[in-house]
Image (cartoon, rainbow, N blue to C red):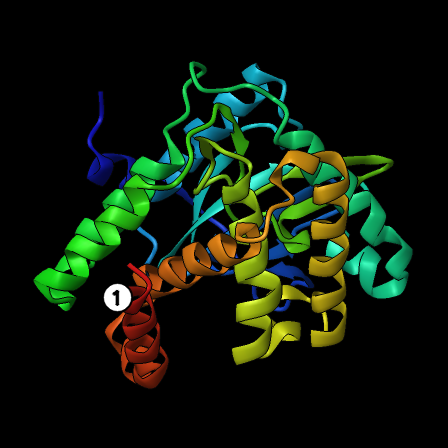
Amino acid sequence: MDSVEVISERLKEIDVTGLPVIGKGGTAVIYRLDDERIAKVFFEHIDLHTVMNEQRACRSALKAGIPTVIPFELAKAGNCYAAVIELVNSATLAGQISTDTANIRRYTDFVLGLNDIEVSEKGFRSVKSQYLEMNEHARQYMTDEEFTCFTEIINGMPDGSGFIHGDCHAENIMQQNDELLLIDMANAGYGHRILEAVGIYYDYVMVADISDPVKYLGLDRETCHLIWESYISAYFLKYQSDNTENFIDKVRKYAKLKGLLLTLPNRDLAKAFEPFLRRTSDELLADR
């Protein structure tokens, strides 16, 4: 098997200069190459190993019956890795929602349906294990007390075997003709459905409140909040046993931890959001 370095050298080059941007997320920008293809260009700090893991996750998803794009061709766009994906007549669901908020119903129905698909033994990793890896990766930037506390929180997350996308905002859902398809499978795994709710809260409440949501999520703040409110209402309607007093508290706690673990290793971002990180850590420690 070729090494990552050899594979990288063999990748063809693509030029996205001046091409229309049809979506943007936390790891990449999506360009329309032509009528039949899009290019997902990862940010420069995303390594080839991570991109190849996402390619494998796409294959596993297809085998498990998850509606996702066909595994893509790898390429390079300047200093960035890219994925060339065949998608004809496609647009992001976020774009559809920005035009007509009635499409939020399509979003909530689609996401809730995904979590019912059992995938624990079909090539996916546990989402809890991914959180533990994130915690270990950020360990050098936290105290021993914080590391122990965060480990306890992760180990206390409920278990499950349903599909979890992990970053299921509407910019990561493509509409091809009348079909909705997932992209950005880097965080895909299996676990309890609350962990999908955590990701949606993180995107549409936390990120929307502290950044420019139009830039990162393709939607204004009011629409982002409307999506969360619509999603959690539909969630409780479907899973009435989860509608307990502390469910939302758990979602908020896990989402805060996710934000902290994602931000700490990025030192420039960590410096910019230092007050938020300190406040979040103090809240998590106090809530042990």
Q: Quadrant of the N terminus?
A: top left
Place of residue 188 in the rendered image (x, y in percent of width and height, measured from the top left): 47, 36
Place of residue 210 in the rendered image (x, y in percent of width and height, measured from the top left): 52, 79
Place of residue 23 in the rendered image (x, y in percent of width and height, measured from the top left): 65, 59
In the image, is residue 10 above or below residue 253?
above
Q: Does residue 16 appear anywhere in the picture?
A: no
Q: Is 92 on the left or on the right of 169, as rendered?
A: right
In front of the other: 34 or 193: 193
Place of residue 172 in the rendered image (x, y in percent of width and height, measured from the top left): 62, 49
Instruction: Give the residue drawn at x 87%, y 60%.
Output: 101
**Would you name the residue on which mark 1 appears?**
285
Instruction: Give the residue drawn at x 16%, y 53%.
Output: 148
Q: Is 89 on the left or on the right of 121, as rendered?
A: right
In front of the other: 37 or 217: 217
Residue 29: quarter of image: bottom right
In the image, is residue 152 above or below residue 100?
above
- Residue found at the very far front of the displayed protein: 245
Instruction: Give the residue drawn at x 24%, y 74%.
Output: 267
Instruction: Give the residue drawn at x 45%, y 58%.
Output: 255
Name the residue type under label 1: Leu
Q: Quadrant of the C terminus?
A: bottom left
Local crowd at mark 1 within 10 Å, few (<14), some, or many (≥20)? some
Q: Is 178 on the left or on the right of 30, as rendered?
A: right
The number of numbered badges drawn on the structure is: 1
Residue 17: quarter of image: bottom right
In front of the other: 209 or 219: 209
Q: Does residue 89 appear anywhere in the picture?
A: yes
In the image, is residue 37 above or below residue 150?
above
Helix or strand or loop: what does disc 1 sit on? Answer: helix
